[in-house]
Amino acid sequence: MIQCVHRLLCLSVLVAFAACNAPPVPLDDIIIEKTFVPEQCGRAVKVGDYVRYHYNGMFPDGKKFDSSYDRGSTYNVYVGKKQLIEGMDKALVGMCVNERRLVKIPPQLAYGNRGYGDIIPPDSILHFDVLLLDVWNPDDGVQINTYYTPPICSRKVEVSDYVRYHYNGTLLDGTLFDSSHTRLRTYDTYVGIGWLIAGMDKGLLGMCVGERRIVTMPPSLGYGENGDGSDIPGQASLVFDVVLLDLHNPRDGITVTNQKVPESCTRKSVAGDFVRYHYNGSLLDGTFFDSSYSRNRTYDTYVGQGYVIAGMDEGLIGVCIGETRTITIPPHLAYGEEGTGSKIPGSAVLVFDVHIIDFHNPSDNTEVTIIYKPEVCDKQTKKGDFVKYHYNASLMDGSPIDSTYNYGKTYNIVLGANQVVPGMEEGLKDMCVGERRHLIIPPHLGYGERGVPGSAVLVFDIELMEMEEGLPEGYMFIWNKDVSPDLFTEMDRDNNKQVEPSEFTDYILQQVNEGKGRLAPGFDPYRIIDNMFSNQDRNGDGKITEAEFKLKADEAATHDEL
């Protein structure tokens, strides 16, 4: 049994030895073994195509006789035009980029009975391990595959437009040779005027901002026979994955869209007006760069006078209070080629969504609108009158500021005494008790740049509740009846020939209480009386002598004289 097994083993060895040393079986045609086939094959090699491929050339025993890898360069050639041995011409047809084939070629389809010098003996079967990297045809043009189109496309790239875009550039086999993303900076250029390779010039036409497309071009529209001398080999097809971020033309002006104008628009801004507005600022692709809302403060500026970028200067002319609009500004009317650094890149189109809060002109006066006036109006307010009124205060956009109704009491002032802002002084003049008015007060007649908020136009709805007639201008005290000829004696109650402050105060208050005299309303009576005493106390010794004592009618005196 053991002998039998040994005989069989020996027989097997002899058969194997004979097989290894037997002459190769002749091939009638090429044999192709596909060792790797990519999942996607956008294009297969046809006769007449130009290909770039790597290969290792070997004899059947595995001995290498040639390799493109060793030369560090692909083999580049037309297929089916007898520029290759016949077997390779046949083997390349139908290949896809990145496909790998093991090709066995009989001698009659290779170098035949002559061989090739000292490298390939006569009648040699040749094996080629082939990897296809590129394929194109002289008739090829630019191929465009748009894989994302934004829902809104108001404008497409045309010849002479200036664009900003990101891209990844690869060879047809996927090898990356360049990317704007890695530089963190867009590629910015004019389109269609020769600033780009011809294929990209064509590939960008018709794009929308936000669109993404694959642009594939043959070398004749790329870098041609010589490549770029670095990362792009000669005769290479190029593939660019492009996203368009920005688009404008040097002839562009600003564009105003999405206008919403309030029904009640009685006035539109003109050059020289001071405008307060909120805004959101973004790039054309929607990238946010700034917002007044995030600072919780309006942007305040004069318009039409160069205080803001030219496009905004223009875009804020003709607006109404409460209006919203979108202002699109090309870079030559914004921050130009340099941008602002980190937030706004060079040559960027800017989009501002603007809400106009208020505006005024330095020449504006208080605007007074009478809402209601009583039929009977015997007395009207004037300078010096003591008035009591209610008000609701707001900004032009309706935002409330303050209201006397919240406190349950009126606001009380003396007109002309600088106790309120000038605009309110003006608005309270010539009013009747019970009258209601609507006041619009510009900031230079309101609270100015330091108001809350600064430079704000204020709106007051006021109602006059009470008024007390003031004294004639220049007087803080008047007599309602004839003045006693013994005035000094009446004041000098202790008959010591001098009037003390307490005697003076008691006497004046007595005259007021008895209706014989009046103090100016709305002021502290003791402060008025103190001023009156000081004016009579000529030498400042704290008492009034008869020689010092004089009535207002006796001299050219000041406000607090008797």
Image (cartoon, rainbow, N blue to C red):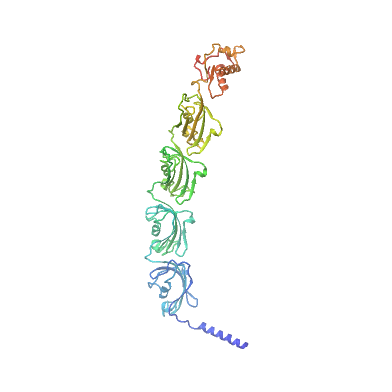
Nearest to the observer: residue 240 or residue 327: 327
Q: How many marks?
A: 0
User: As displayed, is residue 204 above or below residue 414?
Assistant: below
Q: Position of residue 349 (x, y in %)?
A: 43, 49
Instruction: Decide: is 396 above or below 152.
Output: above
Depth check: 5 or 210 in front? 210
**Residue 73 in view in this figure:** no
> As rendered, which of 117 and 524 lies closer to the eye?
524
Measured as percent of width and height from the top left, residue 336 is found at 43, 47
Q: Quadrant of the N terminus?
A: bottom right
Residue extending farthest to the front is 375
The image quarter containing residue 406 is top right
Residue 419 point in image, percent of width and height: 52, 28
- Is residue 180 among the parts visible in the rendering? yes
In the displayed structure, would residue 511 be above or below residue 172? above
Q: Residue at x 59, y 11 (%)?
A: 497
Residue 296 at x, y percent in the picture: 52, 42
Image position of 60 with respect to 468: above or below: below
Q: Residue at x 59, y 17 (%)?
A: 506
